[in-house]
Amino acid sequence: MEYLESIILGIVQGLTEFLPVSSSGHLQIAKELLGVEIEENLTFDVTLHAATVLSTIVVLRKQIWDLLRGLFRFERNSQTEYVGKIVLSMIPIGIVGFAFKDQLNAMLSSSVIMLIVGEMLLVTAALLIFAARAKEREKSELSWRDAWIIGCAQAVAAMPGLSRSGTTIATGLLLGNKREVVAQFSFLMVLPPILGEALLDVIKSSGEAAATGISAGVMAAGFVAAFVTGCLACKFMLGIVRRGKLTWFAAYCAVAGVVAILSYIL
């Protein structure tokens, strides 16, 4: 892998991790265009995910610090309840990760992956359209029930091409929660699962960088690209959700889905 390929993949990861257009789907499309087998290099994949996790922490540092302060008071308060809801939302994706990770990884190398990605992008577009038309209610705080349902939506979004942020935000809006509340919860709830997956991948890929011949400089270039674009995309997405402009991304996902399906057929 060259520096340019690493930077392009980093930019794709940073942008699409937060925008409701499916990072897994776009990384697959980028892989096809660049001819890079990124799923065979867990170390590089972990590097990109670590960059987007760091960008989330930087953008939402005030909210995260507030949650940590409340949590370490060791008493029941609004912060401990919020953390509890995040933990609850992690259960479905944890089950899917342990039970179906091998099947999902095998799907990425399937001959019909572009067809799957295209279909899931169309599903993402439909979800975003429904969410954009949903009437916002005065639910300023997520309930435990909503946290569980949004967590289930995140588990379903493990399918390649189905946007995690798009699915969770759309689900939260359809449940009647306020836009800014849903957006913040969507970005915070993904941190523990990504960190957990990254830790498992680090254990599996110990020493892989040397074996695959990817230099530290190339990995650093991908990390920086993913981190910078991730920070920008996270801030941008928070603003977009507040303004209710999700239909822009619905149109994009619909076009990208059709293109992916046509690329498979043709």
Image (spheres, grey):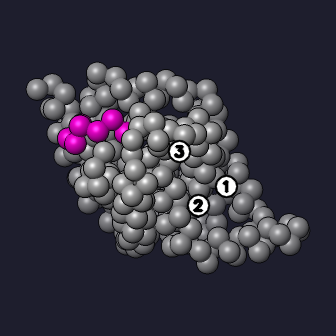
Q: Is residue 43 above or below residue 103?
A: below
238 relative to 197 in the view: left or right:
left
Q: Earlier in the sequence, mark 1 or mark 2?
A: 1
The magenta span reads 32-38
Q: Secondary structure at mark 3?
A: helix
Indicate the quadrant where residue 155 lies: top right
Looking at the picture, which amino acid does disc 1 mark?
Answer: Ile
Indicate the quadrant where residue 119 lies: top left
Q: Earlier in the sequence, mark 2 or mark 3?
A: 3
Labelled pair 1, 2 in contact (Cβ < 8 Å): yes
Labelled pair 3, 1 in contact (Cβ < 8 Å): no
Residue under label 2 = 188
Labelled pair 2, 3 in contact (Cβ < 8 Å): no
- Residue at the location (40% across, 26% down)? 107
Residue under label 1 = 86
Q: Is residue 113 above or below residue 244?
A: above
Disc 2 to disc 3, C-alpha distance: 12 Å
* Residue 86 coordinates in the image, percent (x, y): 67, 55
Q: Is residue 224 above or below residue 210?
A: below
The disc placed on residue 154 is 3
- Residue at the location (64% across, 70% down)? 64
242 relative to 5 in the view: left or right:
right
* Residue 150 coordinates in the image, percent (x, y): 57, 49
